[in-house]
Image: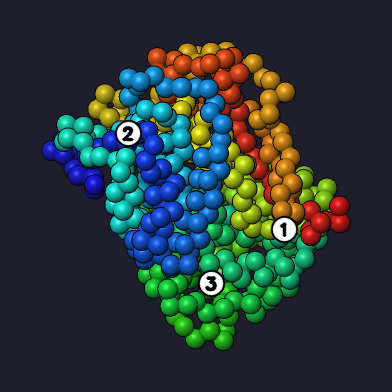
Amino acid sequence: MSATIGSNSAILLDCHCYTVGSGGETFLSYVTTNKTALIDAVQLLPKQEATHEIELALNFMQHYMHLEDDGLIDKPNSKHRVLIDRRKSLFEILLDLHSAMRATCVGFQLYFYGENPITSKFIELLLKFSSFSSQEMGDQLALSGEIPLHLAYCTMIVFDSCDLESASDRLALAWSTNDAPWAIRNVLVQENVKDEFVQLVKAKLKPFDDSQKAFLKDTLPRALEEVKRFGACPIQNGTDESNVKPTLAFVPGVQYLLATDGMASLRPSPVVTMSVFRTAKEAVSLANGNNGGSVSLWSEELSLTFEVAYGLRSQTVWVNSYAEFNPECPYTFRREDFCYGSDYAVCEKKVKTVFAPTADTPTNSTERNRAALKSLGTYVADTRSYRGSTVQLKKGIHYETICSPADVDAYGEGHRLAVADNFWDTYVSLDAMDRRLLLDAVHNQRKVICIPFGVTFAN
């Protein structure tokens, strides 16, 4: 299953064929039945964290199974290619794979790329699902270059108008999430409450358990060396005598503590970086300058909350909360990547692909993507579409999904994703609405804002 290096220095990826069968076991039922074995197959990561990611993914997968067919049907002779990145989290791998399955009624050739000791055994067990089969050597995919993957993490923004006790409670638990793309690793705190907030957090930091220490025993000491190199003072609980313990530091951005070696640089430092800001405008600017994909925003001023939430480039925003999930909403955690949740996530898999650099097409091309977009048809904004800006209230959480135009010109050299070529040679649509939903998946993007009304705000 692992990639090999060919004689011409190409990276050769083994092919696994997924075939849609009639009846039999579904991928959801396979993962559900083998959940314990899959958790045990995860290496290095604390078991509690692996369990949470897999159970959360199963919740999203159940939603995908109940989605109505979007009417975009692939032809029986269609040949699809799906690339899954091993460097991603368990949650992302499961949903990238399952949404691709839900996007086809034929099947696809499946390739895994990247290296990750956490997920390697886990993926081997996934591939034992009965609808997968290995292909001949001739079906290997030869990559002529690397496929980019952007760093993902959550930025916490703490305003003086928030409940500092609640915000510090949340930050003190930051290391319960290390592998998921929403792990809190960057904190912006308003200057006039900085000292009070730091003292609250410092007093609440708890010693790591044995599994957390084992996971962080190599990366945390290296990050502490970087902290000292920048002349920053680590913030730790003085009563914790362990060498591996929760650590924060005032450093001007997550990127300053990143390792340069491949695997480590795809995860944020285990040291949570902190910075100060004075105004809401400065907070938005700092967060957008270090956009990890998601934000946990803390304020009890409603007008300020929406001013900041709407100004953030991050497409997932939690207000006075963290990691609240609703599978009916489309969450995005990485730049230039797929979303998770809602029918939008499945439709995306039909029309967007991970660009694979090969000898014939070594770079993603702006011209090629423009031609692919043009071949899809003419997009006309439809404000009546149910996929537009929507509001849901579920279990006391207000979920607002905001629709805004995407920068379609961004698809080009260096971009991780590409628009599918000759889409209508592969798919047919049942009516005009199907085509509008397809075009919407390319021309628009979604932001989800989650607010626990009734708990956070009086209204």
State the residue at coordinates (69%, 20%): 382
Q: Nearer the viewer, mark 3 or mark 1?
A: 1
Spatial separation of the CA atoms under disc 2 and disc 1: 44 Å
Pick whichever of labels 2 and 3 is earlier in the sequence: 2
- Report which residue position mark 3 lands on: 247
Marks 2,3: beta carbons within 8 A: no
Pick whichever of labels 2 and 1 is earlier in the sequence: 2
Q: Residue furthest left?
A: 7
Local crowd size for mark 2, using a 10 Å CA cut-off: few (<14), some (14–19), many (≥20): some
State the residue at coordinates (72%, 36%): 390
What amino acid is at disc 3? Thr
Q: Quadrant of residue 366?
A: top left
- Report which residue position mark 2 lands on: 19
Element at label 3? loop
Question: As drawn, is 266 to the left or to the right of 332?
Answer: left
Local crowd size for mark 1, using a 10 Å CA cut-off: few (<14), some (14–19), many (≥20): many
Q: Quadrant of residue 154?
A: bottom right
